[in-house]
Image (tube, helix red, strand yellow):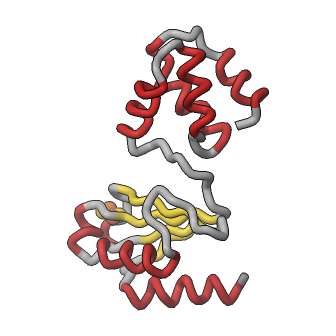
Amino acid sequence: MAKDALNAVMQEFSGEGADLIPMLQRAQATEGFLSTETMSRIARWLKVSENEVFGVATFYAQFRFTEPGKHHIKACLGTACHVSGGEQMLDMVERRLNVRPGETTEDGEYDVERVACLGCCALAPVLMVDDKTYSQMSVLKVQRLLDERDDDS
Ligand code: FES
């Protein structure tokens, strides 16, 4: 994260231990993810150990540690999606893009996130790419969708 941007985030807080989670949230909102350097600087600012900052950040699913991709894929693994083949859907995304949830593809095109419920369970299993929802996804439909997106780019 650019030094100035992180300094601006830090100035919003008083530098107490209770600021840790809100600071991590603000830093991620500004940068899109939490880099090792950002977390180290936050640790120094709050006068806590780097281990504590890394421990807290990795505990919460809301934080990501790799730069986001150009496009954001959300694979729903809530109950309705899970029982309707959500795991196979996500597995296909992972194999096709060679990426795991929380990571970004090597070409920076996609990042993948596993989510608990997208609020449209009747359409399970559901995949979102950016702000578009794809319903009743099967392994074949995932493959076709990603092939079509490849052709468009
Ligand atoms: S469980 Fe997937 S949309 Fe609700």
The image shows residue 108, relative to residue 30, as above or below, that is below
Q: Quadrant of residue 44?
A: top right
- Look at the image and tell me in which quarter the C terminus lies: bottom right
Split into quadrants, the picture shows ligand 1 in the one at bottom left
- Look at the image and tell me in which quarter the N terminus lies: top right
Left or right position of 56 against 39: left
The image shows residue 52, relative to residue 150, as above or below, that is above
The image shows residue 145, relative to residue 103, as above or below, that is below
Depth check: 52 or 24 in front?
52
Q: Quadrant of residue 84?
A: bottom left
The image shows residue 5, relative to residue 90, as above or below, that is above
Left or right position of 84 against 28: left
Residue found farthest to the right? 4
Image label count: 0
Give the percent coordinates (x, y) of residue 125: 34, 74
Give the percent coordinates (x, y) of residue 85: 27, 77
Can residue 130 be seen here? no
Can residue 37 be seen here? yes
Q: At 44% across and 87% down in the image, what residue appears?
A: 141
Q: At 45% across and 76% down in the image, what residue appears?
A: 93
Give the percent coordinates (x, y) of residue 113: 46, 59
Left or right position of 100 against 71: left
Q: At 66% across and 70% down in the image, what residue appears?
A: 107
